[in-house]
Amino acid sequence: YLIATMDVHDPKGYEDYRAEVPAFIAKHGGGYVVRGGAAEVVEGSWPDGRIVVLDFPDYAAAQAFYADPGYQPVAAIRHHTATSHLWLVDGVPDGASAAGMRGFIIGRVRIDDADAYQTYAAQVPGVLAQLGGTYLARGGRCEALEGGMALDRLVIVGFADVGAAKAFHQADHYAPLRQIRTSAS
């Protein structure tokens, strides 16, 4: 997956980017999972701007999209019209597709206490499954491409809709795990 935030400061110029980038995404087998829309920070901080999530057949295809020499002039339009952050993250091996999902939790995680975080990581899949969530990316290889925001891991969890994502985050039986996670990361 490629995750991007774009704080657009030249909307008219940015339209040129929006018109040209889909061809490069498709060229590398990618597609949109999230393209703008409402977003809410429920914990921590996240860069301002619209959020875009792209899925690719594999990590190498996402890297090839970003490095494509033909894309570089298009990326220059984005750099001129928006402040952006971009990250790549491995999807879950043999994981679910985002097809049909309309609500997502995207987490940028910096781990402070690896042992405590491991306790969280071991227990959360069961609660997540009970509440209708599916890991799309979880603790795999990840890298910051632009924006300089350090991270240990990126997590993407898909849900049927935003209401289901919020219900998971606010669920009483997730609360003890959320407390472990927030104290460990």
Image (cartoon, grey):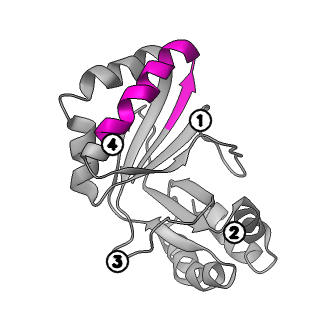
Residue 157 visible in the displayed image: yes
Q: Nearest to the eye among marks 2 and 4: give it.
A: 4
Tell me if mark 4 has few (under 14), some (14-19) or many (20+) residues whose alpha carbon lies within 10 angstroms of its own: many
Q: Nearest to the eye among marks 2 and 3: give it.
A: 3
Q: Which label sits on residue 178?
A: 2
Q: Is residue 45 above or below residue 159?
A: above
- Locate residue 124: give its quadrant: bottom right
Residue type, mark 4 in image: Ile
**Which secondary structure, mark 1?**
strand
Tell me whether the residue at label 3 lies in contact with that at label 1, contact meaning CB atoms closer than 8 angstroms: no
Residue type, mark 3 in image: Asp
Q: Nearest to the eye among marks 4 and 1: give it.
A: 4
Q: Position of residue 12 (x, y in %)?
A: 55, 13
Mark sitting earlier along the chain (2/3): 3
Residue type, mark 1 in image: Arg
**What is the spatial separation of the Cα atoms under label 2 and label 3, in whole angstroms?**
26 Å
- Locate residue 7: give its quadrant: top right
Q: Residue at x 45, y 67 (%)?
A: 138
Q: Quadrant of the C terminus?
A: bottom right
Q: Which label sits on residue 25?
A: 4
The answer to whether residue 183 is left or right of residue 149 is right
Magenta stretch holds residue 112: no
Q: Is residue 85 above or below residue 135?
A: above
**What is the spatial separation of the Cα atoms under label 3 and label 1, in whole angstroms?**
29 Å
Give the main secondary structure of the magenta stretch. Answer: helix
Give the residues drawn in magenta, as a range.
5-25
**What is the spatial separation of the Cα atoms under label 4 and label 1, in whole angstroms?**
18 Å
- The residue at which mark 1 appears reads as 50
Q: Position of residue 83 (x, y in %)?
A: 50, 23
Tell me whether the residue at label 4 lies in contact with that at label 1, contact meaning CB atoms closer than 8 angstroms: no
